[in-house]
Amino acid sequence: MLKVPIQNNEWIVGLKYEVASTKAVIFFVIGFITLLVIYFLVVLYFSKALIEDISLVVKNLNDIVKGSEVNLDKKIPVTSNDKIGDLVIAFNKILDLEKRNLETSRELAIIKERTRFSRDVHNTLGQTMTLLVTHLIWNKESIF
């Protein structure tokens, strides 16, 4: 504080403040630390949820890449409405496409096998019929 004489009076210029008590300071410090701990617990909870979703997508993608038997009917549940949720939705769409591709591949393999079998039957029957016709012609000529 500063004492300043103005018009034969002495004025005090400055700020007056009271020093907080030690109990009040301790209360605020403990409150701050408590809020900080709660903040970190909340951040840890949400980051763990995000990491679990991403880890599940990564695990399933690695299973697909390795050629492991993956249950294509088991979709990952969408638990958030953010970019992680978009990633899970895209992964589930990839599972659907992969399932359709596998079904198409199986159908094509069946068609290929049927075509091969039909060709073999056709060739065998064609050769047998040709042989029979040739024998009939030979027998007919030998009789006459």
Image (spheres, grey):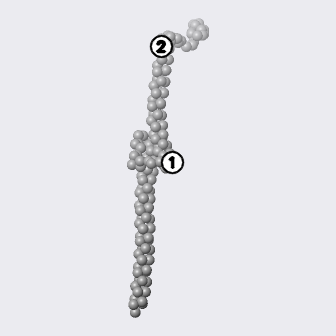
Query: Quick one: quadrant of the C terminus?
Result: bottom left
Quarter occupied by residue 76: top left
Q: Earlier in the sequence, mark 1 or mark 2?
A: 2
Residue where numbered disc 1 is placed: 66
Q: Which residue is drawn at 40% across and 88% down?
A: 140
- Identified by mark 1, the residue type is Lys
Disc 2 residue crowd, few under 14, some 14–19, many 20+, Cα 10 Å:
few
Is 102 rendered above or below residue 83? below
Q: Which residue lies furthest to the front in this view?
A: 143
| Residue 61 in view of the camera | no
- Identified by mark 2, the residue type is Ala
Is 50 rendered above or below residue 98? above
CA gap, disc 1 and disc 2? 62 Å
Task: Say left or right for 133 vs 18.
Answer: left
Disc 2 on helix, strand or loop?
Answer: helix
Residue where numbered disc 2 is placed: 24
Give the image location of residue 94, x and y in percent: 45, 51
Disc 1 on helix, strand or loop?
Answer: helix
Q: Which residue is drawn at 46% across and 34% down?
A: 48
Is 119 rendered above or below residue 38? below
Q: Residue at x 42, y 90 (%)?
A: 141
Quarter occupied by residue 133: bottom left
